Image: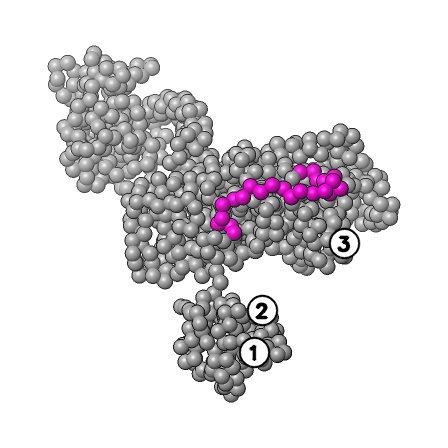
Amino acid sequence: MRTWIVLALVGLFGSSSAEAGEAPPSGESLFTEQVEAILANSCVRCHGGDHKKGELDLSRRAPALKGGESGPAIVPGNLDESLLIEKVAAGEMPPKTPLKPEQVEALRAWVKAGAPYPREPVTPPRAGADWWSLRPIKDASPPALDAEATRWVRTPVDAFILAKLRENKLTPAPEADRSALIRRLSFDLIGLPPSPEEVARFVADADPLAYETLVDRLLASPQYGERWGRHWLDVVRFGESEGYETNMPRFNAWPYRDYVIRAFNRDTPFPQFVVEQLAADVASGGASKDWLSQAATGFLVGGTHDIVGNATIEGMRQQRVDDLDDVVTATGTAFLGLTINCARCHDHKFDPILQKDYYGFQAVFAGVNHASRAVEAADAEARREKAAAVAAELARVDQGLDEFEPVARLDADSPARPMVNPRRNVERFAPIKARMVRMTILATADPIEPCIDEFEVYTAESSPRNVALASAGGKATASSEYPGSAIHKIEHLNDGKLGNGRSWISHAPGKGVVTIAWPEPALIDRVVWGRDREEAYRDRLASQYVIEAADESGAWRVVASSLDRAAYKADAPPAAAADSGLTSEAAARRAELQKRRAELKAKLDQLGTTVSMYVGTFTQPATTHLLRRGDPMQPGAQVSPSAVAAVEPALNLSPDAPEGERRLALARWIGDPANPLPARVMVNRVWHYHFGRGIVATPSDFGFNGAAPSHPELLDWLAARYIAGGWRLKPLHRLIVLSAAYRQSSRGDAGAQAVDRENRLVWRMSPRRLEAEAVRDSILAVAGKLDPEMGGPGYNIWEKNTNYVAIYKPRGELGPDAFRRMIYQFKPRSQQDPTFGSFDCPDAALVAPRRNISTTALQALDLLNSGFIIQQSGLFAQRLADEVGADPERQVDRGFALALGRTPAPAERAAAAALIRARGTPSFCRALYNANEFVYAP
């Protein structure tokens, strides 16, 4: 049997049969009125342009008559020989949606009339520059309503909702009771259940503004940022591991999470929110200069990154363009609601996004690199002060330990002292009166120019003084100085500042002479020098040297040299100090000093003025080219940094624009009020999280393949209010949650269900299951164990491992360190929380503008039998015993109030008390955790 390659069709219009007594329509009119739309909507997407399945092209008449691999699909005037008609009439095509009889008749009549193509090529429908989401925002007025309808309206939002309901002959549900409203608001705005006391106060509050007061209190809560920050982290694919096969952890990615929480709590205006996430490192103004604002660029590198190197040029280039594609995708979907990434290999098939636009975006981000970056800490000045005090004490301890260093022996014929140390070396000798000291370097451990970070000369006094210090009158000279380096100068030899950044380097490989002189002769007994006291560098270390001292006459005497030191070995650990020759008291004193030194060193290490954050590094990029078919080995024309040409206002930069200016310009373009997309996208996200479904049901796709808005005028009205209100979200929340539409009960209505099964018209409040984070946080809150600590590194529920490929094995039991809100849980990719991962947590490998909502047996098993639930049920039971004693009925009442925000019905109280008596209070608590009412917002 022959395999026929035909086409998938979805008919759109009515019958082509002529009315009785009328002449049949011509082939041309059939085409223009019916057939062209059929071909455009279904056929040429697979059988036209660049995509010709089975080599069949139906976009033009000639290739259509020629046919594909299975022969002619259309034979003009001959229905029996036209495979198109055969397959469509048999219901085999389209494979999933067979045509209606009248649609088949339209095609038959057209073929019988000669199958003309008066217009060609036939192209699939797609969004143009006039697509609804790309048009300017219209500040429409709320619909006018009659007096009766106006009584239901609480905010202008309701006028839009009620007008649509009336158009469809629907009526809104009654208002929810107060206990349901406070529970709904609490979960929506802060992600936690209200306490029984809060419920009781609100229900009993006679103030007509009690609801408004509740809304304002919740919006002002710092827990609001934790709740709504988690939503944003979904949208931008935030995770704390690399992904791919190694999936190594990023333990310093958490500052971005804290930035997001703070931004929501501060109600940061959207344009600033965008600028900080795309370009905080180059944005002007104090708001972008503190360390947490600097963490905002974690958005750019928040996605997956393959850390396994690739030896081939093809592989390296592919990894690089994949990283950039991740940034383009996240930016386009999060801020614009556009699938710009679909134009990576060719022009977007559905939206007015050119391949050139995609690479214009890529050019903007071409200098972004996955890496950590050091940023000045918020308390940098305080850290500097503490570090100076610790360093001063550390110097005193070092001087105390110097007393136990062996004296240099000029006559030694075998090693009597340890080998030189890159950090610090003490040269002790018999006291000598001198006015200058000279160190002649004869060789280095590596054959390059020697380096000394500080050269000190101490007096033989009960309180030794460093007479070499420049501030004490010391003057440094040297045989030469490394040219062209501001950090390696002669004056750094005795400036009192330690580390490679303030050091001297000779200009002669392996050799050099330094001399320190001071104004008045002094009795000295020790010289201290090092290559790098901060221990960052070990190269350029003097391994062979002579140290001499001279009095006023200038007669030099050798006081120490490297001859009595052990030979230097780069990989050998520093030699432990020997106790030989020390009294027991002296040995104990040295041990005490060594212990104190270790404590001070550890403390100093924690007082750095910078913090390392996984927020990306930036370099000036090379030229960006359009890649043919997205292949990094096929570069095409040069592309300048730019945005989507079809979206106003225009943005085009020069090809050599500075890297930071590119990102800043794009951020300002996104936040421009003339750009119609961002305001619509953001208000739609807020609506989505309040009602469970956005006005546009596809929150990150406002293009042709996305859903049409259910209330387009309301969407634009909210977007206009959002911009006019300073791009702040909290007034938008208030406008929505104060509406009568939001306050509706979730009461069912069979008639409304038949008209609007998905509740797109908002005739009631749809019951919504809580996300995993809200469920876990609520369990802890009800048990009285939720730790309210905000910010900082997250808690880790995984066992430590040091494998090359990360393995995330859950800890056997979680303690109070893991009882913080779930937003602070360390979140690796490709590994879910063992209890709550089944509740549709996003993986963070991809953007997640909306979460799936599934109901599975695994969820029930996790909530019933997991170790965490059993543990928390026991803690919940202990709380009940502590608060109301052992009486089962009182425990039931308190348990219902804590977990469900209400009192139990008499039958519930009796059954629950019987359960406690038979199985214990923990079983009752576990039953409450497993109630639908517990995991659903009313």
Nearest to viewer (mark 1 / mark 2): 1
| Picture coordinates of residue 453, whole percent (x, y) | 26, 29
- Amino acid type of the residue that numbered disc 2 sits on in the rendered structure: Phe
Magenta run includes residue 136: yes
Q: SS of the residue at dot 2?
A: loop
Q: Is residue 869 left or right of residue 470?
A: right
Q: Is residue 147 above or below residue 208?
A: below
Q: Is residue 609 above or below residue 695?
A: above
Q: Is residue 262 visible?
A: no
- Amino acid type of the residue that numbered disc 1 sits on in the rendered structure: Ala
Q: Residue at x 38, y 22 (%)?
A: 392
Q: Which residues are magenta?
A: 132-155
The residues tagged by marks 1 and 2 sit, at their Cα atoms, a distance apart of 20 Å
The residue closer to the viewer here, 752 or 584, is 752
The residue closer to the viewer here, 911 or 651, is 651
Q: Residue at x 56, y 70 (%)?
A: 10
On residue 749, the disc is 3
First-in-chain label (1 vs 2): 2
On residue 13, the disc is 2
First-in-chain label (2 vs 3): 2
The residues tagged by marks 2 and 3 sit, at their Cα atoms, a distance apart of 34 Å
Q: SS of the residue at dot 3?
A: loop
